[in-house]
């Protein structure tokens, strides 16, 4: 059931949004038997949609023998309770479906913590709607019914649990920070993008590790996965796959996954993966940009990557158009052996821009130091004179600082 504001962007893309909601429902494990929509001048505070549309929805549910109704819009606790009462059926909104999918996709301890936190924050204002087995109206003057007392107890317990989960996720963030500080200095890249844009396939293609799980479905990946990748010509990068974004991603869910997305916050580059074959890829790009802004990541360097170029009807025309609109963008595909070469070349160029060329002079006898320069950077020129080796090399700033701290002569 979709109920966008009349004249809004959501109303203009109503069918596409219902299609995406159907995919979400299918991913969650339910079968779609019918769909309905209403464009609203103003939402009904009691039921979101109008009374006539509620009756039409009930008749459709009876005819199709539906057992569940899913709304594309987020329902307030009152609206959810009233619609359930009118339909005598279980009612979910888009946010609840996404949470349901996340709960089944979570694998690591961290992902379970984040999903549980998001579920509790969603549940807290809706507790009254969930309560049907105890009376909340039997209390007299100055007295409270047993249900009301239990509701307050449940609210307090949920708030306490939320506090404990947030504390645990802070510990997770500290643990990640410790891991980052112990890593070998290297360019770090975070894959971000709309769900099912192909981020996991890219990581598998770049790393060559086929055990990385990929799938043509929404939210295949929840857990952060990091792999070191060989970019060629002596360049390496640390690439992290992150959870996919989606339209109307619940705010509490975004907040819960801040610990996971810390990897993106500390990345040298955000690789915005876009499904080039999707008819609404430009709208999906806007969604991702909005979520990045909400996560305070809008100031990070971003490289647009148009993936699945093999599935585009006219790749040549598409690339020509993209080059005009997004000059810094790259195209890729994971179904051809050479499909990631242009991406690797662009990443090498990005790293070169971050690595100024310097001249390092070491004694001829210090072969270990020369070998270190070859491992750590891109050697442009080398010559020996007067018992010293002079190497012109591109190095990251932290390596330059390390060499200078060790007393090595570095110029430039």
Image (tube, grey):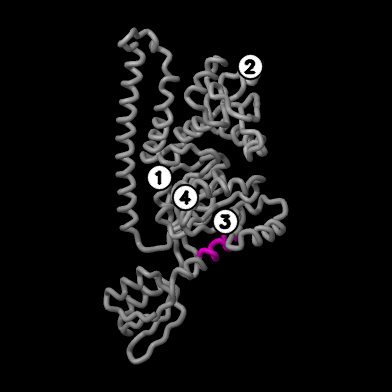
Of the numbered discs in the image, which one, if any, rests on residue 241? 4
Mark nearest the camera among 4 and 1 is 1
Rate crowding at label 1 as few (under 14), some (14 to 19) or many (20 or more) other CA atoms within 10 Å: some
Q: Position of residue 118 (x, y in %)?
A: 41, 34
Foreground mark, 2 or 3, reads 2
Tell me the tag on residue 305: 3
User: What residue does disc 2 label?
Assistant: 55
Please identify the residue farthest to the bottom as the structure is shown: 386
Tag 3 and tag 4, C-beta contact below 8 Å? no
Quarter residue 50 falls in: top right
Labels 2, 1: front one: 2
405 or 130, nearer to the observer: 130
Q: Identify the secondary structure beneath mark 4.
A: strand
Instruction: Give me the C-alpha separation between circle 2 and circle 1.
Output: 41 Å
Q: CA distance from mark 3 to mark 1?
A: 23 Å
Instruction: Give the vertical position of 74 relative to 54 (above or below).
Output: below
The earlier-in-sequence mark between 2 and 3 is: 2
Q: Are marks 2 and 1 in contact (CB under 8 Å)?
A: no
- Foreground mark, 3 or 1, reads 1
Tell me which label, 4 or 1, sits earlier in the chain: 4
Please determine whether, in this image, residue 21 is positioned above or below residue 287. Answer: above
Estimate how packed mark 2 is, as few (under 14), some (14 to 19) or many (20 or more) residues with alpha carbons within 10 Å.
few
Query: On the image, which quarter does residue 228 sit in?
Result: bottom left
Q: Secondary structure at mark 1?
A: loop
Q: Is residue 211 visible?
A: no
**Which region of the structure is painted magenta?**
338-347
**Is residue 49 or residue 355 the one in the foreground?**
49
């Amino acid at each position: 059931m979709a109920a966008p504001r009349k004249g809004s962007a959501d109303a203009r893309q109503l069918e596409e949004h219902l299609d995406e909601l159907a995919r979400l429902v299918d991913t969650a494990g339910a079968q779609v038997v019918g769909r309905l929509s209403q464009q609203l001048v103003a939402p009904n505070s009691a039921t979101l949609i109008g009374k006539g549309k509620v009756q039409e929805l009930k008749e459709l549910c009876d005819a199709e023998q539906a057992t569940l109704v899913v709304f594309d819009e987020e329902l307030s606790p009152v609206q959810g309770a009233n619609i359930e009462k009118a339909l005598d059926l279980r009612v979910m909104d888009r946010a609840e479906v996404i949470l349901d999918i996340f709960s089944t996709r979570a694998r690591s301890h961290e992902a379970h913590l984040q999903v549980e936190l998001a579920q509790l924050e969603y549940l807290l204002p809706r507790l009254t709607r969930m309560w049907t087995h105890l009376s909340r109206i039997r209390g007299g003057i100055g007295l409270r019914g047993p249900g009301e007392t239990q509701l307050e107890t449940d609210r307090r317990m949920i708030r306490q649990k939320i506090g404990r989960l947030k504390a645990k996720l802070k510990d997770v963030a500290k643990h990640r920070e410790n891991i980052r500080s112990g890593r070998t200095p290297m360019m770090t890249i975070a894959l971000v993008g709309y769900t099912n844009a192909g981020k996991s396939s890219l990581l598998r293609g770049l790393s060559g590790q086929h055990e990385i799980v990929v799938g043509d479905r929404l939210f295949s990946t929840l857990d952060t996965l990091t792999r070191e990748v060989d970019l060629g010509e002596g360049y390496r990068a640390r690439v992290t796959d992150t959870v996919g974004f989606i339209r109307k991603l619940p705010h509490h869910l975004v907040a819960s996954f801040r610990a996971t997305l810390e990897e993106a916050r500390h990345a040298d580059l955000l690789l915005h993966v876009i499904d080039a074959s999707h008819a609404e890829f430009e709208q999906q790009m806007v969604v991702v940009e909005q979520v990045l802004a909400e996560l305070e990541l809008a100031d990070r360097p971003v490289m647009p990557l148009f993936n699945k170029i093999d599935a585009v009807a006219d790749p040549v025309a598409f690339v020509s158009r993209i080059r005009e609109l997004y000059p810094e963008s790259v195209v890729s595909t994971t179904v051809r052996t050479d499909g990631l070469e242009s991406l690797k070349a662009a990443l090498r160029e990005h790293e070169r821009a971050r690595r100024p060329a310097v001249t390092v002079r070491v004694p001829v006898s210090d072969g270990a130091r020369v070998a270190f320069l070859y491992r750590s950077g891109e050697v442009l020129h080398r010559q020996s004179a007067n018992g010293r080796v002079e190497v012109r090399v591109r190095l990251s700033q932290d390596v330059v600082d390390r060499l200078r701290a060790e007393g090595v002569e570095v110029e430039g």
